[in-house]
Image: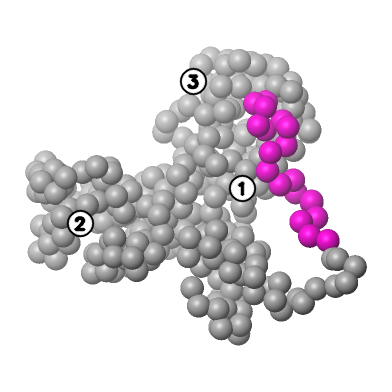
Amino acid sequence: MNRTSNEALIGNAPEFRRMLNAARMVAPTDAAVLLTGEQGSGKERIAREIHRLSARASGSFDMLTCAGMAETDLAACLSGQWADSGGSLFLDEVAELSGGAQARLLNLLASNRALGRRILSATARDLTAEVERGAFRKDLYYRLNVVPLDLPPLRERAQDIPALLRHFFVNAGILHGLKPPTLTASAERSLRRYTWPGNVRELANLCERLAILFSGTLLRPENLPAEIHRGDGSAAGDVPLRLPPNGINLKELEVELIRQAIELAGGNKSRAARLLGLTRDTLLYRMQKYLINA
């Protein structure tokens, strides 16, 4: 694909637009931003957009992958060629830092040696839960989490899939010198129903593959990978629950669904709210109303 394309900014789903608007509001400030979201949801792209709109845009955007990084390597990177660049430093998968590396990063931040740059961080984990179980330092968490931005997964903004498909097909056509394929309505429905565990990154890779293998072709469901055209995932409009003849206790059902959503979201209240089709404030109100602790 065209690796410079900014697909992270494509979409009109309400949760996505709220996140993007918040990113653009915080961009001109120098506040630390913590981006959370599943793998492939576009955290790096949003970080780059924040840098582009900041007063540091003329400086470099440096990305440091934290997974497997030793304490000494972290210190060398932060105090070496990247020191005082005046740009932005993006710490990807910051939850993967070892305890020693977390302590070193906190020390560098506290002593200003890492703050020639703005700090942007990202993780696919729930850092609040990591702090609660003692796997991530609370003091470092508060330094990184000045402004939290939670990216919704692609399955929760299926309405954006058609625009993303057009974008990726056009890009693939330009990159490989091919005529982009088109989709039948049934093929597009299959793509919207699929749950996209790899999120936008998975969709981009699939579009590139289809553009190469089916250049200029009208794609039908049978041209899609088996897990997509056979309808894996919940179809939009399916009825997930039917009322039994003897009725239900609605309060007990609501409490149970809230607990299940919180568990599925790994304790992340924003994600749990999206699973239930609620705002975060409404979820917190109902948790308080039913004395649900999580």
**Relative to 204, is 26 above or below?**
below
Residue 284 picture quarter: bottom right
- The verdict on residue 139 being magenta is no
Q: Is residue 284 left or right of residue 223?
A: left
Q: Where's residue 49, x and y in %?
A: 40, 48
Q: Which badge, 3 or 2, comes first in the chain's sequence?
A: 2
Q: Earlier in the sequence, mark 2 or mark 1?
A: 2
229 falls in the magenta region: yes
Q: Amino acid at mark 2?
A: Gly
The residue singled out by tag 1 in the image is 155
Q: Which quadrant would residue 225 be assigned to in this image? A: top right
Q: Foreground residue, 63 or 54?
A: 63
Residue 99's tag is: 2
Q: Which range is magenta?
A: 224-242
Q: Residue at x 68, y 73 (%)?
A: 254
* Circle 3 Cα neighbour tier, 10 Å, few/some/many (<14 / 14–19 / ≥20): few
Q: CA distance from mark 2 to mark 1?
A: 34 Å
User: Which coloring applies here?
Assistant: one colour
Q: Residue 267 shows which numbered tag?
A: none
Q: Is residue 168 visible?
A: yes
Residue 281: horizontal and vertical position, in percent?
56, 75
Amino acid type of the residue tagged 3 in the rendering? Leu
- Callout 2 secondary element: helix
Which numbered mark, 1 or 3, is in the foreground of this view?
1
Q: Nearer the viewer, mark 3 or mark 2?
A: 2
In the drawing, what numbered circle is on residue 175?
A: 3
At 79% across and 51% down in the image, what residue appears? 238
118 or 244, nearer to the observer? 244
Q: Is residue 207 left or right of residue 146?
A: right
